[in-house]
Structure formats: C-alpha cells, structure tokens
Amino acid sequence: MRLLFLGDVVGRPGRSVVLDRLPNLREQWRLDCVVINGENAAGGFGISEAICDELIGAGADAVTLGNHSFDQREALVFIGRQERLIRPANYPPGTPGRGATIVETQAGARVLVVNVMGRVFLDPMDDPFAAVEREISACPLGAAADAIVVDVHAEATSEKQAIGHYLDGRVSLVVGTHTHTPTADHRILPGGTAYMSDAGMCGDYDSVIGMQKDEPIRRLIQKTPGSRWEVAGGPGTLSGIAIETGPDGLATKVAAIRIGPNLEESKPGFWE
C-alpha cells in the first residue's frame, strides 16, 4: 500500500495547503491511506468539527490529535461520533473518544491508526508503551490489519525513538508529531518499520513553530506573561512522510514530504 502521513496542521495556513494540495496528491500518487495530525488546526489550538470534516473531505482517512486535543471544548462532544478522529490512547480511562481506529481502503485493505502521547516534558499520561501494545495486540499486523500507522505525539526524540524500536517489525510506520519541525532521520528500521522522529507541520515556517514571531521571542527574552500566541499568516508548507508497504505490511520505501516555501522541497521519487 501507499501511505501518506502529514504533520500537525497549524491554523489557516496549514488547513489551506492541505485543502489545496492533498486532493491532487492523493490522485497523482494513487494513495491508499492518508493520516493527518490535526491538533493545532483551529487557530493553533485544538480542532473543531467543521475543520475535522474539511480535512476528511480533502482526503484524510484519519485525523490524530495530541496535547491540544480538547482545547476546543466542542471536541469533547463530537469526538465521540467521529470515528475517524482519534486522541492519544493513553489518556486516562473515561476520556471521551478513542485512541485508535481502523480505516478500510478502497481496495478493501484494513489500516489500523493508533495515536499515543509521550510523557517526557509533557503532562503526565498513562504509559504510551502499554497503550500502543494494547491496541496492536487487539489488531495485529498481518492478521487483523494490513498496515499499522502509529502517531507518537511527543516532545523528546529519545522517547519517540524508543517507541519506534519497541514496535519495529510489528507496525508499518512510527512517526513523531508535536515539535512542528521535520527531522532528517526518516528510514526503515531493521525489522521493517518506517520511522521518522517528527513529521514537521503543515503551516507557515516563517514563524516560531507556526506562530507569529514577536510574542514568542518577547516571552523568551522578558519571561513575563503577554498576549495570546497567534498563528502566522503566511503561505503554508506541506510536511510529512510517505511510505510504501509490501505484502507483509512492513515498509519497503520511505521518503520525506516537504512542499511549499521556506523549506527545501522533498517528494517521494518512487511515486513521481
């Protein structure tokens, strides 16, 4: 299968580049499944039902979240009825929503999408290793799932790498989100799992992690409260990772995706 994962959609620039680019890319690259992290899609903080529907309408088969999952309070309600929207599986028991979903492709293949959140430098959560183990044990690769995509929403690259190696050979892709900066370590691990520490963001890179520069700079210099961070309004860049899997559901090809201004462009040459 051909799988595409896009990093954190940040505000209107991120939404615009996804809506503008994804429909054509899905057709051009003959994508089987697209997963997008949407936790910053609504003004940089959370996601609304209307925005979630927009991303799905543009070609997303599943939308993952993270530490901003419920910044838009309406998400507490609509996440229960939107099966394609998932929050980290290691939220405490009783949290609305689900931590995994199964996507059926047009060809009839089944893709398990799992979302977990790291615990290093973030709010303490339940164990992400135990949470992802629970989800993939219930729907193992090659038996109940033809491919498995795991979004690790975490700050520390060490934690993301540890989860990648822990899952190597048992899932198709482990990809990090949250830092909004694409890493250059996309590769296939020894057991056949594609890995990337951070997919980057879909947003305006002439910014501080997608936000207008002045207030983050002022806060770092003065260390005093100030105005709310606002999303940078320049043109967005599409960032993520593309993989192709073999009959066993493990990765055979991997490439970084960067399409837009401010970053060097990168596309999967094996699909062009």
Image: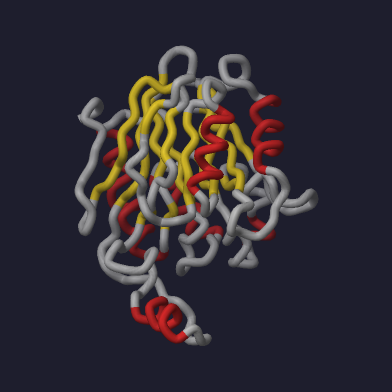
Q: Residue at x 61, y 59 (%)?
A: 122
User: Which quadrant, please, contains the C terminus?
Assistant: top left
- Residue 16 image offset from top left, x and y in percent: 33, 59
Q: Residue at x 76, y 51 (%)?
A: 92
Q: Is 231 placed above or below 9 here?
A: below
Residue 22: image quadrant is top left
Q: Residue at x 65, y 24 (%)?
A: 139
Q: Is 270 placed above or below 179 here?
A: above
Q: Is 85 placed above or below 227 here?
A: above
Question: Which residue is most to the right?
Answer: 94
- Residue 89 image offset from top left, x and y in percent: 67, 44
Q: Is residue 160 left or right of residue 27?
A: right
Between 23 and 194, the one lying in front of the other is 194
User: Which quadrant, please, contains the N terminus?
Assistant: top left
- Residue 158 image offset from top left, x and y in percent: 51, 44
- Residue 178 image offset from top left, x and y in percent: 48, 54
Between 185 and 241, the one lying in front of the other is 185
